[in-house]
Every structure is written in structure tokens, then in C-alpha cells.
Image: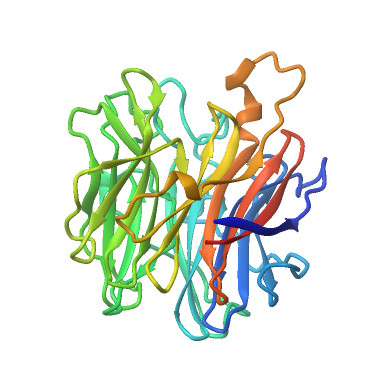
């Protein structure tokens, strides 16, 4: 695998509500054009955050000026913000948007999304919207009802469409903000057979009943043969350390899953890009070894990500003076890559990078 070219998708403006551009995602539509979404705000987590959208008709070389088509609605009278939006094309011109809404009122003094004392989370909801004109206009947001057992719901992946038209949405569970009980984290799948209007009961993808292992930030994709591959950011709660990325495979539409498999690379996986011939490009963030973003290719959704295929997309230069050391904020000011297969057989990887004051959305195009 080799790097073809790279560039800036959107440049931040320090000291404004566009200072932190993070959490990018890219959709390659059936006509070959691209739509990118990302979070824009004064910080990575802030009440003024909005979703910006840009388009490209030349395989990501150039991008339109950012737009802000998605409103931040109030739910049940509570003010909130939309942190992330993922797009999925269900048919030519028809796109479903999945978003994660954050309650910004119930716990106004919360230092962030998580309560550091309880490990609970502020209220969060999953909202969906539809477009019938390739994303030019959108329906109003509609909330996805969640079982009480899910708690505040985290969204880390776009909705997936299976060959039979079934939709699969993966969700991470969280404890409520003031819940001080032991946390038994789960990641689950919901299925819809009516285009995302209703959803079935949750099916476990990753769950350790002892509470030792957490499966965070699950990134998943559908192979040409209909199998689903899911890649987890794996955390050991006893040693308080991140393990290698673990993969699970489902051969029955996400109803059951294989045991987790260590794929041999560490830290946080990107959304994988699946090529028409079944090859898979997986990028990942390595924050705690060499502060980089890398990628490898595998011959199939369950294949080996060959070390000889590895390329480095980005290396983060730590501040010369970092009082927090290697685990300071600098390791969180880059990351969250998202890979998407393009119409010419190449792969685009979008990610964010910068400093605490300003983070840009960047891209790299790969020839797998």
C-alpha cells in the first residue's frame, strides 16, 4: 500500500466556534462524489458545537466551503447539541443520517460528557434524519427509542445496510451520570427492516460480564459477501490500559458474533474501508507508543492485516514543553481517522490533527 496524496479538508480558525474541527466521516456516494461531515466548535466538547458538511467531486482533492445543514434540536424541552453525524446511502440519492445528541442542560456543571467520580455519562440520544435528494435537504430529526438498559447511548459508526436491505446500527451502553455502581459496558446491534423507522431488540456484540474488558468505539463495515467486521478499542479496567484492537465477525446479519480476535496492532481503530474485491483497509491511532496514524490492508474482512502493507499517514509532534508528559492533552489533539473506499479503487482516510487551540480536518489518499 502507498500514499498517493494528502491535503486539508477544512482549516480551523483559532479563537472562534471553528477552532476545533474533529470527528470527521466521509461517504462516497454511488455517483462517485463525496460528502464529509465533522464536528465544529470552540473545543472538542462544547455547547456551541455544530456539524459541518462539505462535498468533493474530484476524489477528495478539493472540497466545497463548509455548510451547516443540521439543526441542534431540543428534546422534551431540553437544550442540546449534535456531536457527530454519520451518513449512509441506502439507494442513489437516498441517504440516512445518524447522529448523537448531547443534553447540555441537565448537568450544567459537568466537566465533560463523563462524570469522573461515577464514570456515568450525561444524557445522550440517537437521532435520525433522511434525505431524498443526495443530502441537499433533510427531514426533521427523529429520536430512536432506547431500552432502559442501554443508558445514555453512544454512536461510533454509521448505520450499515446489509445485502437484503436490513439496516444495522451499533450502540455503546453507558451508566447514567449519577450512577455510582460498577460499570458493565456493552456494545450492541439493533436491526431495522423498514428503513430505520423502527428497530428491534439489542443484540450483544461485545460484553464482558465480569466488567474487566470494555469494548469502546466499535468501527464496523459490511463485506461484499454480507459478513460484518467489527473492530473494538479494547480497554482493561484492572490495569487501566488499552490493549490491541480486537475484531469480531458476524456471518448472520449481526445476530451472532465470533469471539474477539487480537489483530496485532494497538489502540483505536478507524471505520474500515471495504473495496469491491473484499480487501479491507484499516487505519488506526497509536497515541501511546509513537503518536501516529497508520494503516494496513487485509485481503478480506477476516484476513490478516499484513505488516508489510503498513503506511504512516501522520505523526504527531508533541509540544516541546508538555507538563502532563506523554499522556497529556497533546495525545488527544489528533486522531479518529475514518477510511472510505472511492470509486477509482483508492481509499480516502480523513482525520483531525492540531493543537488544543486549533484542530484541522486532514485527508490522505491511499492506493491499496
Q: Is residue 112 at least partly visible in the picture?
A: yes
Q: Residue 158 location in percent, x, y?
A: 44, 61
Q: Front-most of 7 and 296?
A: 296
Please state if 71 lies on the left or on the right of 204 as rendered.
right
Residue at left 19%, top 50%?
258
Q: Quadrant of residue 227?
A: bottom left
Residue at left 69%, top 72%?
56
Using the image, determine if residue 343 lies above or below residue 154.
below
Please state if 342 lies on the left or on the right of 246 as rendered.
right
Please state if 65 lies on the left or on the right of 222 as rendered.
right
Indicate the quadrant containing the N terminus: top left, top right, bottom left or bottom right.
bottom right
Q: Residue 105 location in percent, x, y?
A: 54, 41
Q: Quadrant of residue 194?
A: bottom left
Q: Is residue 70 at least partly visible in the picture?
A: no
Using the image, determine if residue 91 lies above or below residue 276.
below
Using the image, determine if residue 360 lies above or below residue 209.
below
Q: Front-most of 139 and 273?
A: 273
Residue at left 55%, top 71%?
342
Image color mode: rainbow
Amino acid at each position: 500500500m502507498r500514499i498517493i496524496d494528502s491535503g486539508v479538508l477544512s482549516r480551523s480558525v483559532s479563537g472562534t466556534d471553528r477552532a476545533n474541527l474533529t470527528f470527521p466521516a466521509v461517504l462516497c456516494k454511488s455517483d462517485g462524489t463525496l460528502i464529509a461531515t465533522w464536528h465544529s466548535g470552540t473545543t472538542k466538547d462544547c455547547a456551541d458545537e455544530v456539524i459541518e458538511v462539505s462535498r468533493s467531486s474530484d476524489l477528495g482533492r478539493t472540497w466545497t466551503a463548509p455548510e451547516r445543514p443540521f439543526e441542534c434540536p431540543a428534546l422534551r424541552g431540553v437544550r442540546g447539541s449534535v456531536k457527530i453525524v454519520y451518513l449512509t446511502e441506502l439507494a442513489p440519492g437516498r441517504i440516512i443520517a445518524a447522529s448523537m445528541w448531547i443534553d447540555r442542560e441537565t448537568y450544567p456543571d459537568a466537566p465533560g460528557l463523563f462524570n469522573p467520580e461515577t464514570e456515568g455519562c450525561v444524557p445522550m440520544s440517537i437521532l435520525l434524519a433522511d434525505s431524498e435528494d443526495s443530502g441537499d435537504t433533510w427531514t426533521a430529526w427523529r429520536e430512536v427509542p432506547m431500552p432502559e438498559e442501554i443508558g445514555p447511548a453512544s454512536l461510533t459508526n454509521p448505520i450499515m445496510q446489509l445485502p437484503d436491505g436490513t439496516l444495522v446500527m451499533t450502540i455503546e451502553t453507558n451508566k447514567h451520570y449519577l450512577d455510582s455502581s460498577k460499570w458493565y459496558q456493552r456494545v450492541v446491534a439493533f436491526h431495522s427492516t423498514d428503513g430505520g423507522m423502527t428497530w428491534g431488540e439489542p443484540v450483544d456484540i461485545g460484553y464482558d460480564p465480569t466488567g474487566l474488558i470494555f469494548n469502546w468505539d466499535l468501527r464496523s463495515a459490511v463485506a461484499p459477501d454480507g459478513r460484518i467486521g467489527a473492530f473494538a478499542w479494547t480497554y482493561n479496567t484492572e490495569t487501566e490500559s488499552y490493549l490491541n484492537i480486537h475484531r469480531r465477525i458476524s456471518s448472520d446479519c449481526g445476530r451472532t458474533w465470533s469471539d474477539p480476535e487480537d489483530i496485532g496492532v494497538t489502540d483505536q481503530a478507524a471505520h474500515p474501508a471495504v473495496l469491491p474485491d473484499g480487501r479491507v483497509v484499516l487505519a488506526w491511532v497509536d497515541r501511546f507508543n509513537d503518536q501516529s496514524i497508520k494503516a494496513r490492508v487485509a485481503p478480506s474482512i477476516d484476513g490478516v492485516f499484513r505488516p508489510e502493507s503498513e503506511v504512516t499517514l501522520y505523526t504527531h509532534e508533541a509540544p516541546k514543553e508538555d507538563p502532563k508528559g506523554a499522556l497529556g492533552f497533546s495525545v488527544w489533539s489528533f486522531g479518529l481517522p475514518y477510511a472510505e473506499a472511492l470509486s477509482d479503487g483508492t481509499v480516502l482516510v480523513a482525520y483531525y490533527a492540531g493543537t488544543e487551540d486549533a484542530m484541522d480536518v486532514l485527508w490522505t489518499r491511499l492506493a491499496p
